[in-house]
Amino acid sequence: MESAAYYLALLILLVAPPYIFVYWFLLHPFAHHWRRLGASITFLIIHSVMLLLMVVIFHFREPLLQSHFEVNSLLLSLAVLLFLVALYIGVQRGRYLTFPILIGLPELSSDNPGKLLTEGIYSQIRHPRYVEGFFGLAAFALFTNYLAVYIVWVAYVPTIFLIVLFEERELRQRFGEPYMVYCRQVPRFVPSFRKGKNLEAKN
């Protein structure tokens, strides 16, 4: 179990910071600039930066994973519960958020702006994937019980909030008034089932 916790913690460190702190921070604020370069060049540049960060993290993996509080059965139970919550949100989100949207292709396209998602779980919260990520990271942090993973989880909250502000600015530019109406009806992170039902009825 200790080995599994170590390798899972290492995997989280290699994947989560590059994706959270590099990918979306490079994509959302500068989407209009990336469109001029095209998706292929954009992804090449961004993934190169992500790969560089992964190499740095792997190089410093031992000091980063030095503080371990050992696997705890109570925390494992809570981790399973939170993982199931993340899994449920992920399944609901996956019905509407396709892979091209997930990686940001509509933001990089001038010809195909994509579709404004307002159905299903998107009629209850505007950013289910980030809520899914919050519960998923919490589950991994509790399962591994490594200080470094806890730090990533805590840093996730303000980072994602800032990313959401950039993302919503880009969505307002892309969809205009319909998106602003949607924002007034549906909360960012905490579900509002009453509003969700009203929104679905309008659609």
Image (spheres, rainbow, N blue to C red):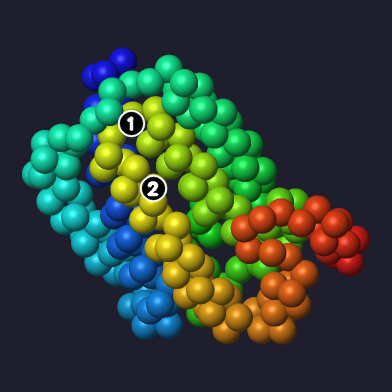
Q: Position of residue 182 (x, y in %)?
A: 73, 72
Q: How many marks?
A: 2
Q: Which mark is residue 156?
A: none
Looking at marks 2 and 1 on the same chain, the residue that comes earlier in the sequence is marked by 1
Q: Nearer the viewer, residue 193 or 87?
A: 193
Residue at screen point 51% across, 74% down? 165
- Which residue is denoted by mark 1 in the rendering? 145
Residue at screen point 23% across, 30% down? 68
- Quadrant where the image shows the N terminus: top left
Q: Which mark is residue 153?
A: 2
Q: Nearer the viewer, residue 91 or 65?
A: 65
Residue 108 figure quarter: bottom left
Question: Helix or strand or loop: what does disc 1 sit on?
Answer: loop
Residue type marked 1: Asn
Q: Nearer the viewer, residue 26 or 160?
A: 160
Q: Is residue 36 visible?
A: no
Q: Position of residue 20 (x, y in %)?
A: 37, 57
The answer to whether 38 is drawn above or below residue 17 in the figure is below
Q: Position of residue 29 (x, y in %)?
A: 40, 77
The answer to whether 37 is drawn above or below residue 82 in the figure is below
Residue 200 figure quarter: bottom right
Residue 82 figure quarter: top right
Residue type marked 2: Trp
Residue at screen point 71% across, 84% down? 177
Measure the alpha-carbon separation of dots 2 and 1: 12 Å
Question: Helix or strand or loop: what does disc 2 sit on?
Answer: helix
Q: Position of residue 67 (x, y in %)?
A: 20, 35
The answer to whether 196 is drawn above or below residue 72 in the figure is below
98 relative to 151 in the view: left or right: right
At label 1, counting other C-alpha atoms closer than 10 Å, the crowd grade (few under 14, some 14-19, many 20 or more) is many
118 relative to 99 in the view: left or right: right
